[in-house]
């Protein structure tokens, strides 16, 4: 069983562990924003060094790799700064593949004057930000399909200018399903990081998911919604967007849906 992990600012007491992960981080600390990934069993297992919106360093301890920690650190950087940039050595194909998987693209190359090494500059636009409603009934998750689309999504959508996440979701529920759910009744459950589907395919997506509101509902679909349905895990895999399956997996892990 995996242990809980948090991402928090680096503290003075973390310096020995940080130095062990990446010695240059300590030398850059005066001009960098340094974050660490910490799990309950092993302590500091990951390191993120930010120079504004540039990722100056990203490292995950060997024993903690392939657990998604690097991805979580990158998405944390995006939550702080939106668009991101970084440089990787041209010979480090693994690092370049990792960055490509997370939506980075190459925009230039340069030669490091000190080492003669080729450095590849990569950047990624700010992720799309959206909100989604978690409404589970009899172990099935409420999902909606917009007109002209054959894929189902969570009820919700994008922010309007000036809206908070709960306000955006409250408005979307009214527009999509005719439901009156006050922003104050919504509670953030978790954030899903995924690749967008449909017209924004390939763009990174940050979807903040909420619980709250009435359990007994009678949706009245708005003009953009073709239909709604409650899906179990198997139906969701066949009919829903990739981010939706990440939501389902989280709900299964929390015991809200059947495996």
Image: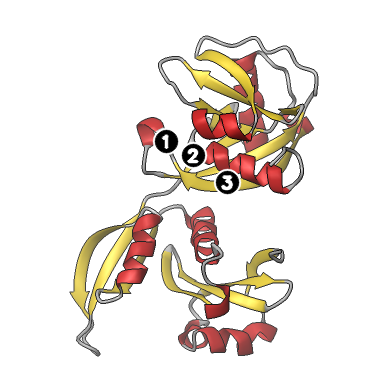
Label ID, residue 242: 2
**Mark 3 in CB contact with mark 1 (< 8 angstroms):** no
Q: How many marks?
A: 3
Secondary structure of the residue carrying tag 3 is strand
**Mark 2 in CB contact with mark 1 (< 8 angstroms):** yes
* In front: label 3 or label 2: 2
Question: Is 43 on the left-hand or right-hand side of 153?
Answer: right
Residue 176, image x, y percentages: 58, 17
Q: CA distance from mark 2 to mark 1?
A: 7 Å
Residue 220, image x, y percentages: 65, 9
Residue named by callout 1: 197
Instruction: Compare marks 3 and 1 and give the one earlier in the sequence.
Output: 3
Q: Residue at x 41, y 55 (%)?
A: 102
Label 1 Cα neighbours within 10 Å, binned few <14 / some 14-19 / many ≥20:
some
Instruction: Compare marks 2 and 1 and give the one earlier in the sequence.
Output: 1
Q: CA distance from mark 3 to mark 1?
A: 14 Å
Decide which of 146, 223 is in the foreground and name it. 146
Secondary structure of the residue carrying tag 2 is helix
* In front: label 2 or label 1: 2
Q: Residue at x 49, y 46 (%)?
A: 194
């Amino acid at each position: 069983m995996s242990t809980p992990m948090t991402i928090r600012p680096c503290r003075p007491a973390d310096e020995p562990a940080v130095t062990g992960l990446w010695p240059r981080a300590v030398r850059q600390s005066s001009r960098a924003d340094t974050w660490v990934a910490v799990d309950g069993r092993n302590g500091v297992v990951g390191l993120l060094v930010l120079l504004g919106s540039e990722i100056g360093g990203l490292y995950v301890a060997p024993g903690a790799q392939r657990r998604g920690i690097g991805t979580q650190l990158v998405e944390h950087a995006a939550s702080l700064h939106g668009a991101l940039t970084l440089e990787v050595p041209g010979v480090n194909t693994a690092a370049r593949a990792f960055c490509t998987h997370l939506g980075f693209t190459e925009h230039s190359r340069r030669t490091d004057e000190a080492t003669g090494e080729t450095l590849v500059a990569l950047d990624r636009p700010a992720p799309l930000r959206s909100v989604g409603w978690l409404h589970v009934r009899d172990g099935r998750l409420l999902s909606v399909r917009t007109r002209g689309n054959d894929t189902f999504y969570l009820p919700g959508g994008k922010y309007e200018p000036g809206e908070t996440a709960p306000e955006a979701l409250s408005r979307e529920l009214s527009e999509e399903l005719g439901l009156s759910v006050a922003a104050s009744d919504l509670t953030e459950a978790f954030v899903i990081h995924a690749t967008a589907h449909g017209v924004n395919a390939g763009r990174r997506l940050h979807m903040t998911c909420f619980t709250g509101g009435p359990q007994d509902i009678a949706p009245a679909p708005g003009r953009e919604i073709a239909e709604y349905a409650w899906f179990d895990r198997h139906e969701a895999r066949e009919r829903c967007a990739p981010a939706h399956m990440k939501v389902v997996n989280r709900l299964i892990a929390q015991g809200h849906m059947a495996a």
